[in-house]
Image (cartoon, rainbow, N blue to C red):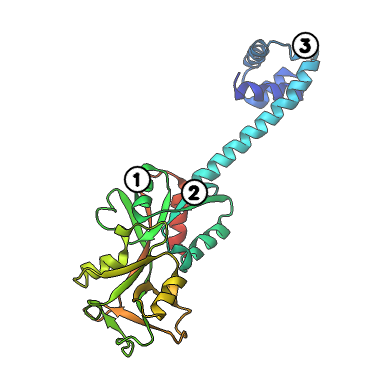
């Protein structure tokens, strides 16, 4: 049994004339008769009562006609859905993100993409930077929104810049550096640091520590790791240390009289930033990924 035989059967059942059905299907009458006989043999029941002058459906044939029409409709719908999925306008996409992504403006990307393509289901989960890269390479994650990848992390992974946020130093209002308008890394060498460590970020992925070491030239004196930004800000206001935070976390705290928030500058006088990227595996064949990347390119 195959779809062609089912289509021939429907044509014969609707015309109740094998010659007309054969012409409709662009085959010979002999071929039509042979295909119907083969279909009846495969299902084990007669579908037509026929003689030289008369053709009609058996009771089994009438039941079978109803079911076959449903099968052919489902087949057409399956083809349509497959073609749509190939175009990337339906289907699903597994999206990973790193801690901090949710507090930034970047979720607007997913929100707007979902509004543009509501038939693409998004499964979203959080992981560490290294965990996301590993998931991309294993095919467990289609795309990841993460911080800028290093050369080692980017091996066999494509990545595209999305946007950057200024890196800010957060001090207590009475801190000896609070009278400055900007800070550079050399200002921070002797400071005690409180670093933000949400549950999804490992200590060896602390971008603040990496920046202080690679660009500031010193290993920071870290006195505490805390998960919640509000707790860190309270600790800073009590004079327990300072913190480096991306602008999107502290943008609503500039009027806090107990805190001083200052931008960090690089040695060349430009603003220090943390950059978000979207990353995906070079071997990923999910058409929804191509659709998302094309949408990002246009928006």
Residue 268 point in image, percent of width and height: 22, 79
Q: Nearer the viewer, residue 7 or 15?
A: 7
Name the residue carrying label 3.
Answer: 50
Q: Is residue 58 left or right of residue 182?
A: right
Classify mark 3: helix, strand or loop. Answer: strand
Is residue 57 visible in the rendered structure shown here? no
Q: Earlier in the sequence, mark 2 or mark 3?
A: 3
Q: Nearer the viewer, residue 81 or 138?
A: 138
Classify mark 2: helix, strand or loop. Answer: strand
Label pair 3/1, CB-CB below 8 angstroms:
no
Q: Residue at x 76, y 14 (%)?
A: 48
Residue 82 point in image, percent of width and height: 54, 40
Name the residue carrying label 1.
Answer: 137
Q: Earlier in the sequence, mark 3 or mark 1?
A: 3
Name the residue carrying label 2.
Answer: 93
Instruction: Give the CA separation, mark 2 to mark 1.
Output: 15 Å
Q: Is residue 168 left or right of residue 85?
A: left
Q: Is residue 44 left or right of residue 63?
A: left
Q: Residue at x 70, y 26 (%)?
A: 68
Instruction: Give the CA separation, mark 3 to mark 1.
Output: 62 Å
Q: Residue furthest bottom?
A: 179
Q: Nearer the viewer, residue 32 or 154?
A: 154
- 148 up-or-down from 230: above or below: above
């Amino acid at each position: 049994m195959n779809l062609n035989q089912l289509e021939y059967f429907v044509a014969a059942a609707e015309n109740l004339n094998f010659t007309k059905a054969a012409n409709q299907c662009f085959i010979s009458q002999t071929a039509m008769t042979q295909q119907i006989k083969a279909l009846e043999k495969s299902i084990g029941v007669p579908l037509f009562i026929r003689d030289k002058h008369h053709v009609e459906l058996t009771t089994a044939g009438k039941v079978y006609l109803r079911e076959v029409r449903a099968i052919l409709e489902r087949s057409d719908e399956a083809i349509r859905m497959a073609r749509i999925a190939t175009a990337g306008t339906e289907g699903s996409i597994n999206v990973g993100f790193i801690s901090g992504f949710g507090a930034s403006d970047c979720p607007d990307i997913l929100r707007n993409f979902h509004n543009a393509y509501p038939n693409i289901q998004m499964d979203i989960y959080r992981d560490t930077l290294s965990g996301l890269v590993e998931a991309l390479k294993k095919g467990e994650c289609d795309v990841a929104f993460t911080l800028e990848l290093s050369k080692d992390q980017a091996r066999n992974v494509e990545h595209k810049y999305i946007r950057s946020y200024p890196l800010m130093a957060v001090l207590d209002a009475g801190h000896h550096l609070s009278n400055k308008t900007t800070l550079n890394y050399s200002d921070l060498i002797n400071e005690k640091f409180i670093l933000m460590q949400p549950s999804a970020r490992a200590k060896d992925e602390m971008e603040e520590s990496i920046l202080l070491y690679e660009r500031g030239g010193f290993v920071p004196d870290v006195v505490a790791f805390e998960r919640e930004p509000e707790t860190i800000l309270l600790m800073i206001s009590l004079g327990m240390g300072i913190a480096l935070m991306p602008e999107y976390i502290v943008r609503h705290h500039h009027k806090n009289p107990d805190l001083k928030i200052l931008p960090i500058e690089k040695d060349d006088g430009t603003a220090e930033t943390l950059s978000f990227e979207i990353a995906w595996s070079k071997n990923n064949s999910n058409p929804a990924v191509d659709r998302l990347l094309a949408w990002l390119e246009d928006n």
